[in-house]
Amino acid sequence: MTSSLPDCRTRQAGAFALRCGAALLAAACLAGAAGAAPAPWYFWRSKVDGKRVCAQVSPGPGWERDSTPYDGPGCEARRRVFVIPMR
């Protein structure tokens, strides 16, 4: 009499493939996140009235970029940290 259920080896191979696929997906996500950097901040000037706004992306079609990129948040220069070694 033949059984309609797959044998033990087939189920184990399928589970192994599923675990390997999940591990590869997790590794790909972590590798992409490791190289990610925050977007730079820019000053944007209104083409209508000349007002300036600080943002990472353009506020809309009526704005043009008005500065070089800032690394720090809110269009501030990144803080410099000086490490003084102990003697």
Image (cartoon, rainbow, N blue to C red):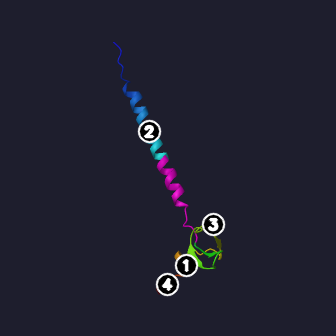
Foreground disc of the pair 2, 1: 1
Label located before the other in sequence (4 or 3): 3
Foreground disc of the pair 3, 2: 3
Q: Quadrant of residue 37?
A: bottom right
On the image, the x and y values in percent for residue 57 come to 58, 67
Circle 2 — which element?
helix
Mark 3 Cα shell of 10 Å, populated few (<14), some (14-19), many (≥20): few
At x 49% / y 47%, what residue is drawn? Answer: 25
44 and 84: which one is in front?
44
Label located before the other in sequence (1 or 4): 1
80 and 63: which one is in front?
63
Foreground disc of the pair 2, 4: 2
User: Which residue is disc 4 drawn over?
Assistant: 85
Q: Is residue 14 magenta?
A: no
Position of 58 with respect to 29 (left or right) is: right
Q: Is residue 33 magenta?
A: yes
Q: Whole-Å distance between the Cαs marked 3 and 1?
A: 29 Å
Is the magenta region chiefly helix, strand or loop?
helix
Specify start and end residues of the magenta stretch as a single range.
Answer: 25-40
Q: Are marks 4 and 3 in contact (CB under 8 Å)?
A: no
Q: Quadrant of residue 14?
A: top left
Label located before the other in sequence (2 or 1): 2
30 and 57: which one is in front?
57
User: Which residue is disc 2 drawn over?
Assistant: 18
User: Which residue is disc 1 drawn over?
Assistant: 78
Mark 2 Cα shell of 10 Å, populated few (<14), some (14-19), many (≥20): few
Q: Whole-Å distance between the Cαs marked 1 and 4?
A: 22 Å
Amino acid type, callout 1: Arg
